[in-house]
Image (spheres, grey):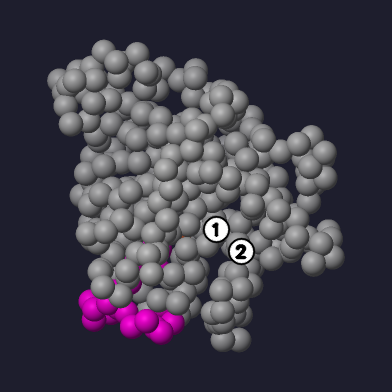
């Protein structure tokens, strides 16, 4: 049975481009189509301008989708310590929601330290942390792999595999926590010789595309998020002791952001019910909204290369892992997720 379903790119409606973050158009450092045309014959990465080849470390961003996603020009994130560059990356996250960096060389500690420099406090109460001891010795470094403590591929019925492959449904990392997850930073350390993409959905564009009536209905609602619930829908159940460590959390269904002056749907598979409504009615609303938000024009699928680091904003995107033959090939990535807390430097 063929498991892969990589569809051809959809034709994007022009209004999607118009819905992109207004700050993106205003930012000086943002990659432009004109730059691409001028230097398109320069290198294997045709979007990189000549100035990059001359060791100008100015960050450049190539849009990968009309409304979100950007690929960042070459930069070794281990060396990024200065606040202006870190702030430029945060602004780009506001603009694009997902950033793709190539050719990174993180040790475990370096990946954790970069995440802390960029976005502060780390999430460590993950679903995998209640199942088994972290093989890296740090619960903030989540093991996104199909490999066990012994380095071998997990058996088909292994509970860690069952939990892991459940990430193939649309979700947002750590939405079942309070505070919830903000950025996730996923780094490819070992990739299979077949595609094993991560797919993203733009929840700000999805919100913008809702009708006025629906926006009015959902404006002040809240959803209860539980990974115990979402795993149960997949046929995977935590024990009572494990479930007690994952109590869930309630968040607004529509999130509003002062930095971009935009709104986003905040739901996905951990969203169990609408707290203001009867459970079946709220669950139907959530299913309808997820169906809307995963229309092809809101999606982008990232094909991994070794050394890629992808950072996404869990507040403005959903994501899911795409299937591959995980009983034949190893796939090892490490993820650090930050919590949606004010950054220390922005506090009085
Ligand atoms: Fe995830």
Question: For numbered disc 1, what is the local secondary structure?
Answer: loop
* Quarter of the figure with residue 13: top right
C-alpha span from label 2 to label 1: 6 Å
Queried whether the magenta region covers residue 145, the answer comes back as yes
For the C terminus, the quadrant is top right
Residue span colored magenta: 137-160
Q: Position of residue 46 (x, y in %)?
A: 23, 26
Asked if the residue at tag 1 contacts the one at tag 2, i.e. Cβ–Cβ closer than 8 Å, the answer is yes
Q: Which residue is mark 1?
A: 171
Tell me the residue at 32%/70% (across/down).
326
Q: Position of residue 222 (x, y in %)?
A: 75, 54
Tell me the residue at 28%/31% (across/down).
73
Mark 1 sits near ligand 1, with its Cβ under 8 Å away: yes
Q: Position of residue 63 (x, y in %)?
A: 40, 30
Tell me the residue at 39%/64% (across/down).
3
Question: For numbered disc 2, what is the local secondary structure?
Answer: loop
Q: Between residues 222 and 158, which one lies in front from this camera angle? A: 158
- The answer to whether 310 appears left or right of 280 in the picture is left
Residue 28 in view in this figure? yes
Of callouts 2 and 1, the N-terminal one = 1
306, above or below 124, in the image: above
- The answer to whether 219 appears left or right of 3 in the picture is right
Q: Which residue is mark 2?
A: 270
How many neighbours does mark 2 have within 10 angstroms: few (below 14), some (14-19), or many (20 or more)? many
Residue 138 in view in this figure? no
* Quarter of the figure with residue 245: bottom right
- The answer to whether 136 appears left or right of 180 in the picture is left
- The answer to whether 312 appears left or right of 310 in the picture is right
Queried whether the magenta region covers residue 277, the answer comes back as no
């Amino acid at each position: 049975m063929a498991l892969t379903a990589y569809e051809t790119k959809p034709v994007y409606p022009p209004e999607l481009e118009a819905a992109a973050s207004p700050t993106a158009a205003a930012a000086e450092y943002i990659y432009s189509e004109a730059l691409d045309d001028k230097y398109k014959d320069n290198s294997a990465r045709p979007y990189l301008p000549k100035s990059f080849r001359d060791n100008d470390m100015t960050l450049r961003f190539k849009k990968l989708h009309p409304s979100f996603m950007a690929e960042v020009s070459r930069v070794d994130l281990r060396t990024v310590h200065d606040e202006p560059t870190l702030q430029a990356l945060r602004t780009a996250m506001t603009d694009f929601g997902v950033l793709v960096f190539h050719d990174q060389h993180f040790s475990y500690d370096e990946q954790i330290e970069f995440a802390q420099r960029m976005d502060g406090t780390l999430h460590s109460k993950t679903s995998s942390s209640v199942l088994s001891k972290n093989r890296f010795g740090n619960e903030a470094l989540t093991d996104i792999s199909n490999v066990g403590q012994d380095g071998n591929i997990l058996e088909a019925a292994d509970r860690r595999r069952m939990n892991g492959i459940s990430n193939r449904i649309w979700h947002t990392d750590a939405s079942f926590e309070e505070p919830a997850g903000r950025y996730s930073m996923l780094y490819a350390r070992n990739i299979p010789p077949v595609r094993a993409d991560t797919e993203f959905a733009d929840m700000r564009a999805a919100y913008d595309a809702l009708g006025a009536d629906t926006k009015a209905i959902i404006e002040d609602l809240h959803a209860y998020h539980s990974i115990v619930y979402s795993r149960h829908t997949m046929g995977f159940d935590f024990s009572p002791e494990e479930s007690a460590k994952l109590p869930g959390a309630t968040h607004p269904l529509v999130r509003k952001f002062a930095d971009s002056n935009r709104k986003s749907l905040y739901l996905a598979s951990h969203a169990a019910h609408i707290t203001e409504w009867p459970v079946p009615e709220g669950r139907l609303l959530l299913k309808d909204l997820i169906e809307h938000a995963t229309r092809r024009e809101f999606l982008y699928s990232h094909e991994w290369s070794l050394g890629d680091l992808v950072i996404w904003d869990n507040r403005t995107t959903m994501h899911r892992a795409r299937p591959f033959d995980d009983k034949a090939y190893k796939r090892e990535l490490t993820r650090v997720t930050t919590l949606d807390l004010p950054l220390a430097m922005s506090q009085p």
